[in-house]
């Protein structure tokens, strides 16, 4: 079975990346996060924990970890301290679908760190089941978390009145029509559009949507892969962390409002940044670019 069968057809670049490489390696001096502060939702292990490790490796000034269960934040806290003893760590619990929780969250983090340079939003929900069969409230849970929760997060980040970067965890699954995935796929497609509107209407907010790849579960990353995709899950959680460091750099402005996959080569994207910007190739979900094994046929 080809492990790239669910990755190659969605390539915007000829080069396929399923490991760290120099341009998104947290150890790359060009990605240094000295003096930067970051807030990470969904940080109770999983991809959020891997992203925290990347920012600690890059020497971030402060990392705020957000999850629903405080005890599950202990592992990424200890990982950050082991990587970078100078990085200040703040661990907080919040329900991102609660306005009062999220408002209090930003108040606490801004009081501790001052400016919040970057928010990486990895918290999400995936409800499986046939459309029409699931109870309405259960089916709508993905929209509550993935769309409403994301809107609340963006709303209160904007209310701080500062410029910043918001990186949202998306998925190529938004483009699939797979039985049992209607709530997840539909909510993630709506999230793509929300990100585009934030980009269009809020110039002080740099917004990106990132597909983290098909990530295998590890001791520190529980993963979020449906069983049928397990044979294809060879991407590494740290890739999303490295890509978030790249996107936090001003040189990534050509990708603002866009959907980006960790499997796409940022060096190749950078070489075609004028075309990407002028033709909006990576807006609404990569639908304008011709994806496939050979990547987009750049002009």
Image (cartoon, rainbow, N blue to C red):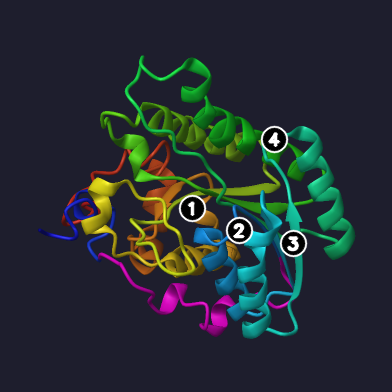
Picture residue at 51% right of the left edge, 35% below the top: 191
Picture residue at 41% right of the left edge, 67% below the top: 218
Determine whether label 1 and label 3 are within 8 Å by CB. Answer: no
Q: Nearer the viewer, residue 146 or 253?
A: 146
The part of the image, by quadrant, that contains residue 78 is bottom right
Mark 1 and mark 2 lie on one chain; the one further toward the N terminus is 2
The span shown in magenta is 16-37
Q: Which residue is mark 1?
A: 255
Q: Which residue is mark 2?
A: 43
Above-or-below relation of 242 to 144: below
Residue 269 visible in this rendered orientation of the protein: yes
Question: Secondary structure under badge 4?
Answer: helix
Question: Secondary structure under badge 3?
Answer: strand
Q: Circle 1: is it few (<14), some (14-19), or many (20+) Cα within 10 Å?
A: many
Q: State the image coordinates of residue 139 (x, y, percent, origin top left).
A: 46, 23
Picture residue at 48% right of the left edge, 16% below the top: 136
Please say whether residue 33 is one of the residues in the magenta stretch. Answer: yes
Q: Which residue is mark 4?
A: 152
Residue 91 is tagged as 3
In three-dimensional space, the C-alpha distance between marks 3 and 2, rounded to whole angstroms, equals 9 Å
255 sits left or right of 85 in the view: left
Above-or-below relation of 281 to 252: above
């Amino acid at each position: 079975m080809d492990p790239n069968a669910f990755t190659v057809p969605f390539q915007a670049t000829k080069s396929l990346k399923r490991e760290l490489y120099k341009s998104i390696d947290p150890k790359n001096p060009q990605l240094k996060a000295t003096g930067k502060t970051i807030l990470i939702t969904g940080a109770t292990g999983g991809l959020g924990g891997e992203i925290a490790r990347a920012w600690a490796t890059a020497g971030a000034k402060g990392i705020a970890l957000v999850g629903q269960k405080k005890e599950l934040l202990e592992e990424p806290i200890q990982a950050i301290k082991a990587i970078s003893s100078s990085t200040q760590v703040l661990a907080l619990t919040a329900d991102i679908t609660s306005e009062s929780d999220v408002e209090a969250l930003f108040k606490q983090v801004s009081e501790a760190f001052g400016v919040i340079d970057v928010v990486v939003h990895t918290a999400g929900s995936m409800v499986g089941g046939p459309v029409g069969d699931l109870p309405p409230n259960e089916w709508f849970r993905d929209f509550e978390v993935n769309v409403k929760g994301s809107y609340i997060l963006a709303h209160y980040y904007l209310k701080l009145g500062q410029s910043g970067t918001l990186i949202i965890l998306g998925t190529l699954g938004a483009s699939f029509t797979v039985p049992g995935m209607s709530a997840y796929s539909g909510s993630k497609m709506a999230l793509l559009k929300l990100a585009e509107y934030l980009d269009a209407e809020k110039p002080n907010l740099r917004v990106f949507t990132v597909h983290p790849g098909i990530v295998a579960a590890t001791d520190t990353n529980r993963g979020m892969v449906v069983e049928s995709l397990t044979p294809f899950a060879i991407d590494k959680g740290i890739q999303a962390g490295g890509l978030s460091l790249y996107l936090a750099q001003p040189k990534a402005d050509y990708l603002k409002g866009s959907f980006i996959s960790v499997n796409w080569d940022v060096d190749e994207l950078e070489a075609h940044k004028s075309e990407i910007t002028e033709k909006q190739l990576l807006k609404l979900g990569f639908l304008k670019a011709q994806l496939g094994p050979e990547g987009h046929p750049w002009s």
